[in-house]
Image (cartoon, rainbow, N blue to C red):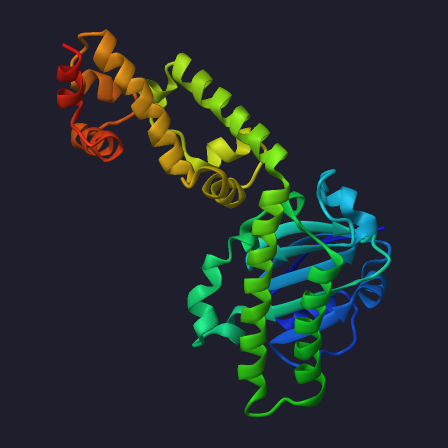
C-alpha cells in the first residue's frame, strides 16, 4: 500500500493526485465517486488541500459520519474548506454512489459569494457533523449540482461563471436551511450537548480555572463536548439564541450574582475570580445581562 503527503493547490493537482481524467474547467470540477474510488485504490495518504470540497455519498455510509437515530438516511453531504489537512484511504469511500464538487478560492473571488462564504459555517464543521439529507433535500441538491455540471461540460462562455456562482450560492443557502432542519430534528442530542456543557462549566468554576486560566476559549469548550467550535456555536444559537461566548458569559454572571448577594467580597476580586482581567469589562458584561451595575445589584439585597 502506498503512503505519502500530497499538497493540492489547483483543480489540475486534484485530478493528477487521484489519477482522474483531465478537468473540463481549470477552477471547478465535478467527479463521480466511482472514478474517484479508482484513483485512491490501494492508497493511503495525508492531504494539504487549497480547495473547497463538497462531497455527497449515499446513505450506506451514514454511520461513518455519526448518523443519529433521528437523522434521515438517504444520503450524506460534507464540506471542506481550503487549507485543511486530512487523511484519505480506501476506508473513507464506503458509499456505493456519490460525487465530489471541487472548486478553488480564486473561482469565487470578486463575486458576492466570496464576501459571504465565511457565513456558511458548515465548511468549518467536522466530518462527524455531516448533513444527513432527506430524499427531497437530496433532489434539490442534485438539481443545483446538475446545472453546474451542464455549465462545466457544455457552456464555458461569458455567462457560465455567473451562472455557476449563482447556483453555488443557491446550493449553500439550501444546505444552511437543511442544517437548521437537522438541528431541529436533533433536539434530544442538542439537549445532551447543553447538559454536558453546563457540567463542563461547573467543573471549570469549581476547580478555580476561571481565576487561574481566564475565560475558556471556544475551541477548548468545543473539544470537551466533542464538537467543532462552529457547530457548537450554531447549535447554541439554535437552542438558546446565544452563541458560545454569550452562553459562557451568562453562566459567569449567574455566579457573580451569588457572590454579590451572599458575600462581601470586593467587586474587583469577584471579577478576577471569574476570569475577567479588566474590571470595566466585567461591569459592562454584568450590566448588559442584568440592566444594572454589580454595585447596584448588590445594593438591592442589602
Between 235 and 105, the one nearer to me in the picture: 235
Between 94 and 263, the one nearer to me in the picture: 263
Q: What is the quadrant of residue 6 in the picture? A: bottom right
Location of residue 59 in the rendering, given as x and y in whole percent from the top left corner: 80, 52
Residue in the image at 53% along x and 83% along y: 162
**Residue 30 visible:** yes
Compared with 63, 224 (above or below) is above
**Residue 207 visible:** no
Looking at the image, the residue that sits furthest to the bottom is: 158
Compared with 293, 246 (above or below) is below
Location of residue 177 in the rendering, given as x and y in whole percent from the top left corner: 57, 57
| Quadrant where the C terminus is found in the figure | top left
Give the number of marks. 0
Q: What is the quadrant of residue 164 in the picture? A: bottom right
Looking at the image, the residue that sits furthest to the top is: 263
Location of residue 151 in the rendering, given as x and y in whole percent from the top left corner: 66, 84
Q: Is residue 116 left or right of residue 278?
A: right
Location of residue 22 in the rendering, given as x and y in whole percent from the top left corner: 75, 79
Residue in the image at 24% along x and 21% along y: 272
Compared with 268, 146 (above or below) is below
Q: Is residue 67 left or right of residue 205?
A: right
Compared with 86, 264 (above or below) is above
Residue in the image at 55% along x and 92% along y: 158
Residue in the image at 55% along x and 89% along y: 159
Amino acid at each position: 500500500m502506498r503512503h505519502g503527503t500530497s499538497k493540492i493547490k489547483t483543480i489540475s493537482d486534484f485530478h493528477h493526485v487521484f489519477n482522474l481524467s483531465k478537468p473540463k474547467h481549470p477552477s471547478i470540477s465535478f467527479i463521480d465517486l466511482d472514478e474517484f474510488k479508482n484513483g485512491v485504490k490501494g492508497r493511503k495518504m495525508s492531504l494539504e488541500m487549497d480547495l473547497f470540497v463538497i462531497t455527497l455519498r449515499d446513505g450506506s455510509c451514514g454511520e461513518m459520519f455519526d448518523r443519529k437515530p433521528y437523522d434521515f438516511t438517504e444520503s450524506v453531504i460534507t464540506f471542506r474548506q481550503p487549507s485543511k489537512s486530512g487523511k484519505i484511504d480506501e476506508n473513507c469511500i464506503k458509499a456505493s454512489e456519490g460525487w465530489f464538487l471541487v472548486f478553488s478560492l480564486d473561482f469565487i473571488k470578486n463575486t458576492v459569494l466570496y464576501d459571504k462564504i465565511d457565513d456558511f459555517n458548515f465548511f468549518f464543521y467536522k466530518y462527524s457533523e455531516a448533513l444527513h439529507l432527506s430524499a427531497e433535500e437530496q433532489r434539490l441538491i442534485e438539481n443545483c449540482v446538475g446545472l453546474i455540471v451542464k455549465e462545466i461540460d457544455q457552456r464555458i462562455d461569458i455567462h457560465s461563471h455567473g451562472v455557476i456562482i449563482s447556483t453555488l450560492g443557491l446550493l449553500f443557502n439550501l444546505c444552511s436551511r437543511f442544517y437548521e432542519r437537522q438541528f431541529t430534528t436533533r433536539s434530544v442530542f442538542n439537549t445532551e450537548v447543553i447538559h454536558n456543557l453546563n457540567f463542563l462549566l461547573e467543573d471549570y468554576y469549581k476547580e478555580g480555572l476561571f481565576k487561574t486560566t481566564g475565560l475558556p476559549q471556544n475551541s477548548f469548550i468545543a473539544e470537551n463536548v466533542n464538537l467543532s467550535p462552529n457547530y457548537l456555536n450554531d447549535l447554541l444559537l439554535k437552542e438558546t439564541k446565544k452563541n458560545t461566548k454569550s452562553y459562557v458569559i451568562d453562566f459567569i454572571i449567574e455566579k457573580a450574582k451569588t457572590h454579590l448577594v451572599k458575600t462581601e467580597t470586593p467587586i474587583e476580586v469577584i471579577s478576577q475570580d471569574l476570569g475577567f482581567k479588566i474590571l470595566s469589562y466585567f461591569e459592562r458584561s454584568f450590566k448588559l445581562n442584568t440592566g444594572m451595575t454589580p454595585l447596584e445589584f448588590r445594593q438591592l439585597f442589602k
